[in-house]
Structure formats: structure tokens, C-alpha cells
Image (cartoon, grey):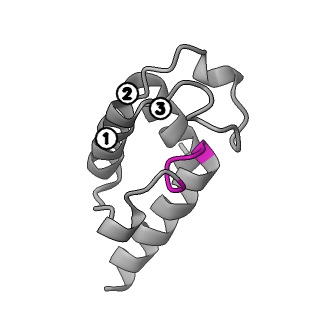
Amino acid sequence: MSAVEAIRSIVAKHGKLPVDVATLQDDADLYAAGLSSFASVQLMLAIEEHFDIEFPEDRLNRKTFSSIKAIAGVVTELSEDQQAA
């Protein structure tokens, strides 16, 4: 399972979106699709647990969680940084 597929699955489970996540493009605006601030925190925690990473404070913003593609980019970057450390 790719990072994008895993994130899509996590968004479907924890994002509490009023739309079917499967119908969203990877770059679709999750907030426009109904992602709330509370759900974004739940999403962040689930992603951290799944990928065994921790979002640094400077990444805890709307831009990071704006789309599946944006989340995947940050997750990939954090995973690579963790492996390099």
C-alpha cells in the first residue's frame, strides 16, 4: 500500500467527511470537502501512529492537511528525515 493509499484510508476512517473519500482527487481541498479542525487533529494522530512519525509544530497547519497529496508529501519528507537520523 502506497503512502497515498494509506492516507486516503486514514482520511476515510478519521476525517469524518460528509463525502465519500474515494470520490476525491488526491489534490482535492479536504477542508472544502468538510474536514473540521477537530477531525484534522484526529487525522494527524492517526497518521502519526500509522507511519510512526511526529509532525513538528511548524507543520501543524491548514496547508499540511489541505489535501491527501499535501499530507503524503509531508509524511514522505518526515519519514525520510527519520530514516536519515
Residue 74 in the image: state x and y as whole percent: 50, 62
Q: How many marks?
A: 3
Where disc 2 sits, the SS reads helix
- Kind of residue indicated by mark 1: Val
- Count neighbours of disc 2 (C-alpha within 10 A) and say few if under 14, some if 14 to 19, many if 20 or more: some
- Kind of residue indicated by mark 3: Val
Where disc 3 sits, the SS reads helix
Q: Which mark is residue 11?
A: 3
In the figure, is residue 19 to the left or right of 80? right
Q: Nearer the viewer, mark 1 or mark 3?
A: 1
> According to the image, label 1 marks what residue?
41
- Kind of residue indicated by mark 2: His
Quarter of the image where one finds residue 8: top right
Farthest residue in the bottom direction?
Answer: 85
Q: Calculate the distance from the C-alpha at mark 2 to the C-alpha at mark 1.
A: 9 Å
Residue drawn at x 45%, y 74% as measured from the top left:
80
* Whether label 3 touches label 2, CB < 8 Å: yes
- Count neighbours of disc 3 (C-alpha within 10 A) and say few if under 14, some if 14 to 19, many if 20 or more: many
Q: Is residue 2 visible?
A: no
Q: Which mark is residue 14?
A: 2
Q: Calculate the distance from the C-alpha at mark 1 to the C-alpha at mark 3.
A: 11 Å
Residue drawn at x 61%, y 26% as measured from the top left:
33
Query: What segment is highlighted magenta in the picture?
Result: 63-68
In the figure, is residue 85 to the left or right of 67? left
**Magenta span: chief secondary structure:** loop
